[in-house]
Image (cartoon, rainbow, N blue to C red):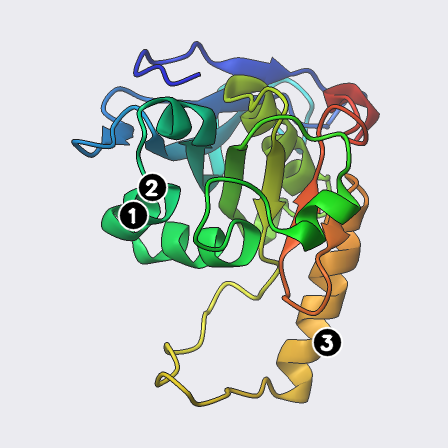
Amino acid sequence: MSDSKVRPDVRSEPEEPGDYALVFSVPPLCLHDHEPDSRVITRIDVEIVCDVDPQSGFVSDTIPVGSALAYRIDGDECSERGWSLWDACDAFEQETTDYCEVLFGRKNWWTPEVEAMCPDVWSANLLILSEVRIDPAHRGKRLGLRAARVLMDLFPVPGGLVACLPRPMRKPERATPGMLVKDDEGTKSAIRALTQYWGRMGFQPLGETGYCVLDPALRAPRLNDL
């Protein structure tokens, strides 16, 4: 599954005049490979732009509308090499460690909770949608969902899952080990709204963990259906 080649841009054509033609740009050097786990985990930084003027509907100069960050984890490759998935995630970034703890624990396979929710999963491949940011001026056109769908098409996880953690963009400071951090009511309300938003694509909450998972082979809508 791992591949360091830069993929071509992907377009989502506008449905009506004034809508956006979404162009998902994966520029050179955006795929950051970390040795020795470069074939197991890939960090993906992308820019989201459109090339239709939202006011007139005519093609104009490229308009930046946001950005996205994702991680692709090849759990099958990790097992084939006899590596610990936990060690690979822990050596990469804190966020990959957090996802691994919730979805895999300390083994190279999904936790019983994940298997119960997604019984048809047959590989340990994972795509983490860490961040999909759309500038306020361009919200309300489903660009976040459409961008997530393009990410899933560009970086597929055969037999695996896609996961996200719906939270407001400003993340709280990391808690001291052993201490619980309680969200205020505003944050809780935002989390509920974001969970419902990602639920439109088929993401389901994983118990009380705060994380959501999706089996793209079963639930993810097509790009033009979003």
Left or right: residue 35 compared with residue 44: left
Question: Which residue is located at x 75 percent, y 68 percent?
Answer: 192
Circle on res. 2: none
Residue 203: x and y in percent read: 74, 45
List the residue tagged with mark 2: 84
131 up-or-down from 80: above or below:
below
Badge 2 density bin: few <14, some 14–19, many ≥20, Cα 10 Å:
some
In the image shown, does 180 or 107 lie closer to the viewer? Answer: 107
What residue occupies the far front of the structure in this picture?
Answer: 82
Question: Which residue is located at x 38 percent, y 55 percent?
Answer: 97
- Looking at the rendered structure, the kind of residue marked 2 is Ser
Q: Are marks 1 and 2 in contact (CB under 8 Å)?
A: yes
Question: Label 3 to label 1, Cα distance in Å?
Answer: 35 Å
Badge 3 density bin: few <14, some 14–19, many ≥20, Cα 10 Å:
some
Say which element carries label 3. Answer: helix
- Looking at the rendered structure, the kind of residue marked 3 is Ser
Circle on res. 189: 3
Question: Which residue is located at x 32 percent, y 29 percent?
Answer: 82
